[in-house]
Amino acid sequence: MEHLLDYINKIGKVLETIHFGLIAEIIINLVILVLFSKAIDVFDNRLRKKFAANDNVQMIKFIPILTRTLKAVVFFVILAALLQSHGYSVSSLIAGFGITGLAVGFAANATIANVFGTIAIISDKAFEVGDYIKLGSLEGTVEDINLRSTKLRTLDNALTIIPNSTVSNGEIVNVTKAHKRRILETIGVTYDTSDEKLKRAIEILEDILQKNSEIYGDYVVFLDTLADSSINIKMNAYVKTNNYVKFLKIKEIVMLEVIKRFREEGIDFAFPSRTLYMAK
């Protein structure tokens, strides 16, 4: 009987050393971690279906990396909260790693920012591979989108790599998404152009637009302004393409025809000039 009582006392002492509150807290955090993990798996599945429907193979291969990153972020957030609740200063712990820890922290912040930048690009449907876009002073064709960056092939054939955090925080102009593109040009002729030639210039511009099968019929040509050095004629027309490179070629054909026809008719283009009056 004494042996049994001793055994019970030992068990009691062991139980006294166990922090049931901590165990309960750990279990709750594990449940939260599992729930978040399941939610991320659902997000993973929906992304796969979405990109599979659009035949976006490039993004499908990055989905596992994205979900693993999100799960790691959730794990560290829960761990940090648990440590913080028991009096451990997470910021002090990170600071204890010194410069290396600081560098890792900055790198982690940049990585997370780029991941969320990628999510923003995807959810907003801002652009996809093959689109011609403008990002601030940069413009070109999107060659690749991954978790960290977007690769842009510029008109001079240079490959520019831009962090997705920068892309998502900037102004994006998707030229490819335009339903039609506009040619808006100001043609300046000299002030010594006769009335007949001025009218003829407008007729020539209208004729060029009318005969081009790539131009919509709702074009307009009109006398716009009397500028300092020129009489300006405005030409506004829409091109039947949303391909930016094709649009540039059509615009080139139109402008070359304008130069050719004006020269044939003896209509002079204006350029900035000044008239000097000499006093005696």
Image (spheres, rainbow, N blue to C red):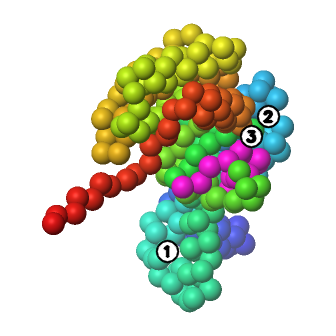
- Residue 159 position in % (x across, y down): 75, 58
Give the class, few, some or many, for how many residues have Cα within 10 Å of label 3's Cα (few <14, many ≥20).
Answer: some
Q: Amino acid at mark 3?
A: Val
**Residue 239: x percent and y percent?**
62, 22
Q: Which residue is mark 1?
A: 90
- Is residue 96 at least partly visible in the picture? yes
Instruction: Tell me where residue 177 sits by quadrant.
Output: top right
Q: Which residues are magenta?
A: 137-154
Q: Is residue 20 magenta?
A: no
Label 1 or label 2, whichever comes before in sequence order: 2
**Residue 129 — which label?**
3
**Which picture quadrant has residue 43?**
top right
Front residue (pair 6, 124) = 124
Please name which of the two marks, 3 or 2, marks the residue nearer to the observer.
3
Q: Which residue is mark 2?
A: 56
Measured from the top left, where is residue 94 in percent x and y? 54, 79
Q: Are marks 3 and 2 in contact (CB under 8 Å)?
A: yes
Q: Residue at x 46, y 69 (%)?
A: 84
**Secondary structure under the numbered disc 1 in the rendered image:** helix
Q: Left or right? Give the position of 253 relative to 22.
A: right
**Residue type beneath disc 1:** Val
For label 2, the SS is: loop
Q: Nearer the viewer, residue 181 or 41?
A: 181
Q: Considering only order in the chain, which callout, 2 or 3, is on the residue closer to the N terminus? A: 2
Residue at position x 60%, y 80% in the image: 103
- Mark 2: give few (<14), some (14-19) or many (20+) Cα within 10 Å: some
| Tag 2: amino acid | Asn
Q: CA distance from mark 3 to mark 1?
A: 41 Å
